[in-house]
Each structure stands twice: as C-alpha cells, then as structure tokens.
Image (tube, rainbow, N blue to C red):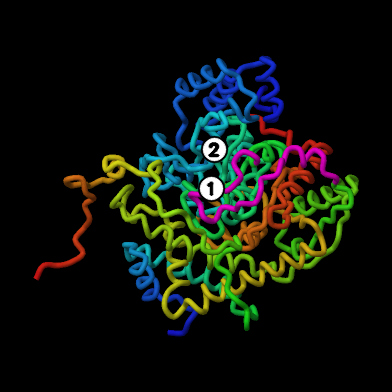
Amino acid sequence: MLLDKTIQELHKGLVNKEFSVFDIVKECYDHIEQSQRKLNAFITVVDKDAALKQAMEKDKAISSSSLLYGIPFVLKDTYVSRGIRTTCASRVLGDFISPYNATVLQKLLDAGAILIGKMNMDAWGHGATSENTDFGPVRNPWDATRVAGGSSGGCAVAIAARMAVFAIGEDTGGSIRNPAAWCNITGLKVTYGRVSRYGCIAYASSFDTVGPMAKTAEDCAVILGVIAGKDPYDATSSSNDVPDYVNIMQTKKVKNVVIGISKEFYGDGLDSDIRQAIFDAQKVFKDMGVIIKDISMPLFDYGIPVYYLIGPSETSSNLARYDGVRYGNRRDYFTEETTRRIMMGTHALSTGYYDEYYRKAQKARTLFIKEYEKMLSVCDVVLMPVTPTHATKIGEFANDPLKNLLVDVYTVSQNPVGVPSLALPCGFSQSKLPIGMQIVGKMFSEDLLFALGHQYQSRTNWHTQKPSL
Amino acid sequence: MSKGTLSKEIIEHIAKLAKLNLSATQIEKFQPQLASVFGYISKIQTLKTNGVMETSQVTGLENVMRDDMVDEKRMLSQDEALRNAKRTHNGFFVVDAVLKEF
C-alpha cells in the first residue's frame, strides 16, 4: 500500500517514476470510499475528479522542489480555504466560504501538496472526543464504538485509516496529541508562534498552535519544515530561523540526553496499561543511551484549573464575533458544550469574579512557566502520558462535562507555557487500543523532539501498526 | 449570595452578557453542570500567587508593527465581503435595530 510509506519514500518513488501522484491520490479516495461512512472523519471531501485532475497535472511536471510535491493531505476544518466550505464543525458557520486561504494551507499548496478534505472535529476545538460536532461523532478506527479523541479527531482517523498522507491539526490543550494517541499516529504540538495562525479559526488565541499529524516523527519533521516561519499576517509568529529538521533528526546524537519523569504523572487516575507502556518506552530510551532522571512537578494538579479558566475566557471573547450578520447563523446554533465554555469564560471575566478567576489564572500561568523552566533546567525533555485512559465509548461523557475536561490532564499545561510536545505511539492496551506518550521540550526544541521520536521509532514498530478496516 | 455558588440568577446573568438566548430548560440543565466545573477549578484559590505577575502571552514579542500601507493582496471587493451574509441591502450588511424610535 502506497499510503504506508513515509513522505520521503513517496517522494523518492515519484521522482523515480515507480508510481504517480495519481496513484497516491487514487488510493486515498479508495480508502475514503471504504471507511468514511463507518468512521465519519471528513466533513467535506474535495471532489474526487477535481483532485485526480490536479494529480495528473502534477504528474506532467514531477518536481523535487519540495518533498511535499504531489502529496495529498487533509486539514482540520478550522482552517479557512478559498472556495471550499469551512464549518469548524458548527452550524453557526454553516456553509461559510472563505474569500482567502489560511497561511498554512497556502504554504502547502505552494509546495505542491494536494488538499483532499476538511476534517470533522469538536466544534471550535471545544472537546477531547470529537463528539461535540454538528456533523456526527468521529469514530475510532481501532474500535468504532469508541471515540477518536479530539478535538482534531477526523485528522487522526484519516492518517490511521490511510485516507491521506498527512494532516494539519490544531492544538490548544491537547487537540493534536490526544487523538494522535488514541488513533496510533504521531502528532506535534509546536512551540507557540512556530507556525502562523493566520486563517486558523481562533479558540483561545494565546494557546492555539498549528501542527502536523502523520504516521511518523520523520513525516512531521518534513511537514514542519514547510509550514514553520514568520508570517507578516500573524504578529505572534516567530522570526526564529527554521532549522533543517529532517537533517538534524537523522544526525543529532541523543546519547546522554536527559529525560525527566515526574511521580506526579503516575497517580491513581492513570490506566495501568498506559503506565506500563510508558515504563517500557523508558527502557527503549535507555538502550538509546538516554539518561532517565526523576524530577518533580508540584503544580501538576493545577493544570486543569488554569487551562479551563483562561481557555474559555479567551473563547468567550473570540466567539463573540459570531452574530450572524456578516456570515453564518445566529448564536442559538452553538452546541451545548460550546455554550458551556462561552458561559464559563464569560463568568470568569465578569465583574466581581475577574480577580478570583481570570486574573488568578493568569498569575498561575506565570508559575507554570517558571515550573517548566525549572524542570527543563535539570533535564532536556519531559516524558509523560498523553491521556489518563483509553479512548472512551461514544456518548460516555455526554452528561458529565467535568469528566470530559479531565481527559486533558496531561496535555493542558504545555499550552499556557508555550513549549512544544511530540505525541507518538508506544503500545497497546490488552484490548488492543492504542497508547501514546508525549515528549515535552524547551521552547523551539522541535529538532530534539524529532530526533528522539525518530530514533525511538527506528527501534520500535508501534507506529507501523494499523487498524483492520 | 456567596461567591463560588452558581445560582440560577448568575447563570441567567452570564447568558445575557454572552448574548445567548437560553431556554428555562437549558438554564436548569447548565446550572448544576457549571457549578460542578467551577467547584473543581476553584481549587486554583489554594495556590499562593502573592506578588506574582500575570502572563497573557508567551511570545516575548512586544509592539509588532507593520508599515502603514494598504496591502492590496488582502483587499476584498464589496461583492466578496458580502457573499456570506444572509441579509444585505444596497451593498450593505443588514443588522437588527438597536435603538428604539420615540
């Protein structure tokens, strides 16, 4: 199957004329036709004939200008795209057609990549299960009675079910990493500002990050090299140089790199199979010459309160613009979960509660930044689980919003701080559900995360496992 | 009413601030849910933050400027700008009246 190959393998095959862009795109559509009805990963599938026609045009002038030339990909439906509807999984936007492209999309199109779909998700990024959507829940390809994770659930399913070569997700508090873990793929939450957010519909502006989701750390490195960098249209994008991630990933020595592990991560709430998988991963890292060191994260338990005060506050402000005047429908169309989050934020920002909630959380955010600085001064990266449990059953959390929030316990504390985190497969439960781990690094240390991830994946085969569909 | 308890009146007040038209049934439903969530996140009050500065963003950037020039690549025609609107009139957006006639 062509879609089992890495991006570099596909590129080599295209340049050597072993197969064509048409063949790759055709295989994506074959898999979409086979699995979409069951898994509900797409909100919009780009017209097949149009995509195949594009593929044939690319085949006429095979180019080695970019590794992504002729590679089919999908976008979380939070990125605006000219001429193709953008819904953010909400009936509030309805059939909104953007007059411009998100920067990340434009960069990929300029590199020669082919957009084939816009993916289902939790509306506005509000959720960890991709059930908070007006387009029906996304289903997990490993067990269709379970959720795919969220909020970038459709993206993760597209990769796991081989319906696209790579995806662009969006991570505000775990939205790339959580579905990556539950669907057995690799996903990167980038350093805040590493990739332009222009054209990415805002959830919580000071947390939102745009990042790659793919089969391997290597593929994520290829993609980040294309999408990272300063964008004049996003004033928060960083002007730091974009390193040659692929080259560094292959050559960087990881011997004597120090991985920190904190006892706070292994409390009672953690599933025993996940605990075991992370311990097993530590052994692999030790074999690579990496040093494992005990560290401490006393603030760990405050991650959820900080995130769920600041995130909803920012979203209540960002979503105030949806009034149905210039585009979209009225506010009555917000889902229950989105309504709750708008109300949480409105309350935290309101007169009489601002100091107690919002201001307090902004101060706690400073303490988290210091905590991470301290941890990452005694180790190079921190290793932790992505989720405390396996993918939940569809509908399991429908009447318990608090439980839904607690799924994010391992992934919410990085976004307020801004640090990058690579999520990758590290095992399966006894019932054959995927398990993920995340490696969290210093600001702009994506190169080291890729090196560790790539070298781990060259010693293990968790990431090559795929669901039978 | 002590702080930290989310009464029905507070829920109605929040909904009004957020311009959300909630039915009585929805208010009944959201009240215990939001109370339980705030009950959990109020744990933040136990954190000592005396003398700690607030953080609102992590870029380290300040006052990012651009030239005061029109970027024609980003300009929309009137037609493009109106294309997604449900209600337009003579090339303008139609909004509900906010002022009453005397």
Left or right of residue A78: residue A184:
right
Q: Position of residue A205 (x, y in %)?
A: 51, 58
For the point 53% across and 75% down, the residue is: A359
- What's the mark number on residue A39? none
Q: Is residue A243 magenta?
A: yes
Residue A243, can we see it? yes
Q: Do labels 2 and 1 share a chain?
A: yes
Q: Main secondary structure of the magenta part?
A: loop
Left or right of residue A181: residue B24:
left
Q: Which residue, given by chain and number where applicable, does mark 1 sit on? A: A231
Q: Where is residue A450 in the image (x, y as percent from the top left)?
A: 74, 44
Check the image and report above or below for B13 versus A446.
Answer: below
Left or right of residue A201: residue A182:
right
Q: Which range is magenta?
A: A225-253
Q: Where is residue A48 in the image (x, y as percent from the top left)?
A: 47, 23
Check disc 1: other Cα within 10 Å, few if <14, some if 14-19, many if 20+: some
Q: Which residue, given by chain and number where applicable, does mark 2 sit on? A: A107
Q: Position of residue B55 (x, y in %)?
A: 58, 70
Looking at the rendered structure, the kind of residue marked 2 is Lys
**Cα–Cα span, label 2 and label 1:** 11 Å
